[in-house]
Image (cartoon, helix red, strand yellow):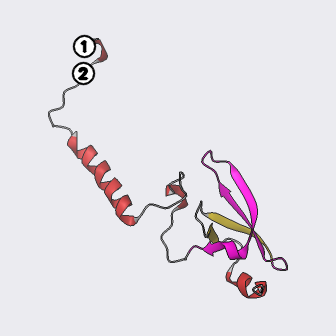
């Protein structure tokens, strides 16, 4: 028995961010065919190429509006987003690197002509 598609599609609108239930990159709903229960989605590949395809609504999950997704920080290899903890750890590492070699610190600089070959 098929689900009534008219009950599924009202949950989606053009501009929604969705993902395949099996995983993958975040995609944006670009068009909706209510009669066929199909959503046309667009996304960018690892090489920053724009892709598009059509998916049945049943195979997609809408990304919750309250979720803090940041497409510009997506882990392109697996389409997942970094957690807040991961982002905080990366920021701390960058800040530690900046202060480790702050002016006034003892830093040894080796010029290329001084290096032994």
- Residue 38 drawn at (x, y percent): 78, 73
Q: Judge by depth and name the residue closer to the eye, 98 or 22.
A: 22
- Residue 49 is marked as none
Above or below 13: residue 70: above
Do the residues under discs 1 and 2 have CB atoms within 8 angstroms?
Answer: yes
Q: Secondary structure at mark 2?
A: loop
Left or right, residue 65 beside residue 41: left
Q: Quadrant of residue 26?
A: bottom right
Decide whether residue 55 is among the magenta residues.
Answer: yes
Q: Which residue is pictured at 66% across the width and 66% down the height?
A: 28
Q: Which residue is mark 1?
A: 114
Q: Which residue is mark 2?
A: 110
The residue carrying pointer 1 sits among few (fewer than 14), some (14 to 19) or many (20 or more) residues within 10 Å by Cα, namely few
- Residue 55 drawn at (x, y percent): 74, 68
Image quarter of the N terminus: bottom right
Left or right, residue 41 beside residue 17: right
Q: Which residue is pictured at 44% across the width and 60% down the height?
A: 82
Left or right, residue 15 beside residue 69: right
Task: Identify the residue at the far front of this view.
Answer: 1
Task: Identify the residue at the far right of this view.
Answer: 35
What is the magenta range? Answer: 34-63
Q: Secondary structure at mark 1?
A: helix
Decide whether residue 51 is among the magenta residues.
Answer: yes
- Residue 90 drawn at (x, y percent): 35, 54
Image quarter of the C terminus: top left
Left or right, residue 8 beside residue 67: right
Q: CA distance from mark 1 to mark 2?
A: 6 Å
Above or below 113: residue 105: below
Above or below 72: residue 62: below
């Amino acid at each position: 028995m098929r689900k009534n598609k008219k009950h599924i599609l009202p949950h989606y609108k053009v501009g929604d961010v969705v993902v395949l239930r099996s995983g993958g990159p975040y995609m944006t709903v670009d068009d909706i065919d209510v009669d066929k229960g199909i959503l046309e989605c667009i996304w960018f590949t690892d090489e920053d190429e724009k892709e598009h395809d059509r998916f049945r609504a049943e195979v997609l999950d809408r990304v919750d509006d309250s979720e803090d997704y940041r497409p510009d920080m997506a882990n392109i290899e697996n389409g997942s987003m970094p957690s807040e903890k991961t982002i905080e750890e990366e920021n701390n590492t960058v800040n530690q690197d900046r202060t480790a070699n702050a002016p006034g610190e003892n830093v040894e600089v080796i010029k290329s002509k001084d290096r032994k070959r």
